[in-house]
Image (spheres, helix red, strand yellow):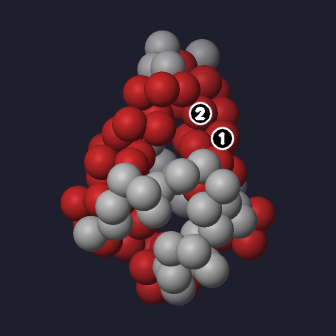
Amino acid sequence: MITRDEIIKRTNETLKKEFEFTDEQLVPSASLKDDLCLDSLDAVDMVVVLEQQFGVTLRQGYNLSTMVTLNDLYDFIENLARTHQK
């Protein structure tokens, strides 16, 4: 099973590549909207690249309004990966 550290690492690497974020920006408490300035179109792009990275469908149960911080996104991916492994 994929570890939390691996989820964080792969998510951050994907976001850095796709959106040109720096390591300093990608802290767990970073707000997706306010700190990272991701709008709804960016959120769609983010979902697509993360689906490719993790080989899962994030759209299932995906709701950006419940994911306020980067940590919320990590939690969501971790829960989805755990469910997907069963």
State the CA–CA distance, disc 1 to disc 2. Answer: 5 Å
Q: Residue furthest left?
A: 17
Q: Which corner quadrant of the image does residue 29 belong to?
A: bottom right
Measured along the vertical axis of the image, is residue 1 above or below residue 15? above
Query: Which three-letter amino acid code belongs to the residue tagged 1?
Result: Asp
The number of discs equals: 2
Question: Could you tell me which secondary element the residue under label 2 belongs to?
Answer: helix
Q: Residue at x 54, y 52 (%)?
A: 27
What SS does tag 1 mark?
helix
Q: Nearer the viewer, residue 51 or 75?
A: 75
Q: Residue furthest right?
A: 66
> Which numbered circle lies on residue 5?
none
Q: Quadrant of residue 81?
A: top right
Q: On screen, 39 above or below 55?
A: below
- Dot 1 corresponds to which residue? 75
How many C-alpha atoms fall within 10 Å of the one at disc 2: few (<14), some, or many (≥20)? some
Specify whether residue 63 is in view: no
Q: Residue visible at 41% across and 66% down?
A: 46
Give the residue type at disc 2.
Glu
> Can residue 67 be seen by looking at this rendering?
yes
In the rendered image, residue 59, in percent from the top left (x then y), is placed at: 55, 59
Report which residue position mark 2 lands on: 78
Rendered location of residue 19, percent (x, y): 31, 71
Observer-nearest residue: 28 or 39?
A: 28
Q: At 41% across and 27% down in the image, what residue appears?
A: 6
Name the side, left or right, on which 54 lies relative to 58. left
Of the 4 image quadrants, the one containing the C terminus is top right
- Seen at 37% across and 53% down, the residue is 23
Query: Where does the image place residue 22, in percent across and percent down from the top left?
Result: 33, 61
How many residues crowd mark 1 within 10 Å: few (<14), some (14–19), many (20+)? some
| Tag 1 near tag 2, CB within 8 Å | yes
Location of residue 60 in the rendering, given as x and y in whole percent from the top left corner: 60, 54
